[in-house]
Image: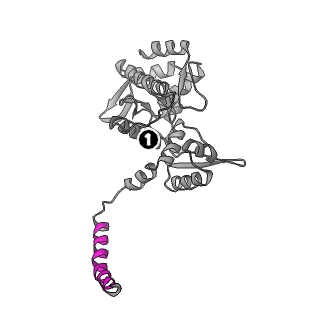
Amino acid sequence: MGGSSGLVSAALCPFALRGWFDYRRTMKAGPDIALVASLLGDPARANMLTALMGGGALTAGELARQAGVTAPTASSHLAKLLAGNLVVLRKQGRHSYYALSGEDVGDVLEALMGLAARAGHARTRPGPREPALREARICYDHLAGDLGVAMLDGMVERDLIRGEGEAEALHLTPAGESFVREFGIDLNEIAGTRRPLCKACLDWSVRRSHLAGALGAALLRRFAELGWAKRVEGSRVIAFSPRGRKAFAETFGV
């Protein structure tokens, strides 16, 4: 039997190899989305990336606790994320910190959360702050949640921002430029960066767009400077004070 089995394997081998090469020839050229999907598809790595959506940097130990894995396992996951260019490593003294490699990674994560919510794939144990996360949270470095979507809606309604054909492309109107300057933001400074000034980011909880890009980040920083809102420690929740909530509503017509 052993010899017969070997002959069969030897006879099939050329066909198996031919099939493999045919498969390789049919693969499309371009960005390898399957590789990125495989990196995002592991629950531990997904938890790590979600923890970094606040735009900050965390240590390997902090990310291990977020993912619920051991330190060696976390190191293995982080090595894969680094190799895949989804996170970057920052060293400060003897400490090493990990952060998302760019705003686009946060955008993809936010969109995937929206898809999971729409498809009914919810976490079995939502956190106690989920209502607060849905109301206002940080998405990489800009405001998301109910208030983030309402802010963009208000700016569009007042003709401060308009769309440019593609769903994600937005631009400030002349009235919007005046509004931003009067609000205390140096438009020349933020427009001089390599990232888009205005961009729509699909909100996972509302499933509509909030404002991302350099302007979205500048507005959230300005809210903190004015004392309107601050990030809850250890969370992505953005908590508005009663005074800040009132001023926010008046400013953006929410």
* Residue holding disc 1: 109
Question: Is residue 25 among the parts visible in the rendering?
Answer: yes
**What is the tally of numbered marks visible in this picture?**
1
Instruction: Check the image and name the residue furthest to the right.
Output: 93
User: In the picture, which quadrant includes the N terminus?
Assistant: bottom left
Residue at screen point 54% across, 39% down: 51
Image coordinates for residue 164, horizontal then vertical, percent: 32, 33
Of the residues shown, which amino acid type is indicated by label 1? Leu
User: Residue 148, how many percent across, how many down?
Assistant: 44, 25
Residue 17 occupies which quadrant of the picture? bottom left
Residue 197 lies, in percent from the top left, at 45, 33
The foreground one among 134 and 188 is 134
Quarter that holds the C terminus = top left
Find numbered disc 1 in the image and state the secondary structure of the residue it sits on: helix
Residue at the (58%, 27%) spot, across then down: 232
Which residue is rendered at x = 37% and y = 30% of the image?
209
- On the question of residue 185 being in view, the answer is no
Task: Look at the picture and state if 160 lies above or below 247.
Answer: below
10 Å crowding of disc 1: few (<14), some (14-19), many (20+): many
6 is within the stretch colored magenta: yes
Q: Is residue 208 left or right of residue 103?
A: left
Give the residues in magenta.
4-23
Q: Is residue 15 left or right of residue 226?
A: left
Is residue 39 on the magenta stretch? Answer: no
The answer to whether 159 appears left or right of 99 in the picture is left
**Mainly helix, strand or loop, the magenta region?**
helix
